[in-house]
Image (tube, rainbow, N blue to C red):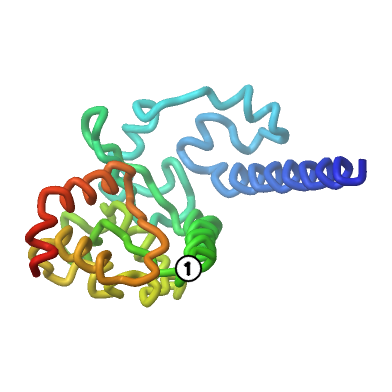
Amino acid sequence: MLADKQLDMECADAININQENLKKILYDNRNTAFGNKYHFSQIKTVQEYCRSIPLSDYRDFQGYIEEMCKGTENLLTAYPLNGFGITSGTEGKPKYIPITCETLLRYSDYLERYKKRIAEESGQGQRLFVNIFRTDLEREQEKGLLCSEVFYGWFYEHGELDTERFAGGKELLFDTGTADGLYAKVWSGILTEGLAVLESVFQYDILHFFDYFEKHWEEILRD
């Protein structure tokens, strides 16, 4: 009974936090193009929000996002943009997902801290990230148009990314001119004692990692 009461209280707290979070987002973005279209300033409750904002897919936001990619502000969000997440394009063309500095401040560290804890609870806590992140982001056409570099760049810049916990360290985590990144990743993974976690941007990257190992194991072991 006591446990049920405690759970009810925690659920109630979570609901209140989510409601206050929604109110803040609506208030902060009330004067954006999207906020004006759906009258954010008049929405006071979750129920009003559900009635006012229709279920949408990417096509409903695409026009706004294309303009945001050109630098137009205050369309979908009033928060400053850090960059765009780019989808893999498995359903057609890649989609650009705006990522604001506010989003990164609020949520990103939770994800990284969770993965840190999982790694630390698993043996020696060494992590192997099977992707390699680009660091050559100075080219004009790539500014602001990043993929996972948005998140991991943020982690690194704010001291949340402990590169010593990754097999191969910073040099292997970020692209510094490695000719064959997967070769280096597999080789480093074999050499790392107590490897606890394999990580990737997409699940198929893990499959690609093992597929590469399967095809090149003789060369890797010989070296």
Residue 74, above or below 59: below
Left or right of 215 in this view: 97 = right
Total of numbered circles in the picture?
A: 1
Q: Residue at x 40, y 73 (%)?
A: 165
Q: SS at mark 1?
A: loop
Q: In the rendered image, is residue 203 in sight? A: yes
Left or right of 8 in this view: 159 = left
Q: Where residue 181 sits: x, y (%)?
A: 16, 61
Residue with the mark numbered 1: 123
Depth order, front residue of 13/184 = 184
Crowd around label 1: few <14 · some 14–19 · many ≥20 (10 Å): few
Q: Where residue 127 sits: x, y (%)?
A: 38, 65
Residue type of the residue flagged with mark 1:
Gly
Depth order, front residue of 220/25 = 220
Q: Residue at x 33, y 43 (%)?
A: 203
Residue 78, above or below 137: above
Q: Where residue 223 sits: x, y (%)?
A: 9, 69
Q: In the rendered image, is residue 105 in sight? A: no
Q: Where residue 177 sits: x, y (%)?
A: 12, 69
Depth order, front residue of 215/112 = 215
The quadrant in which the N terminus is found is top right
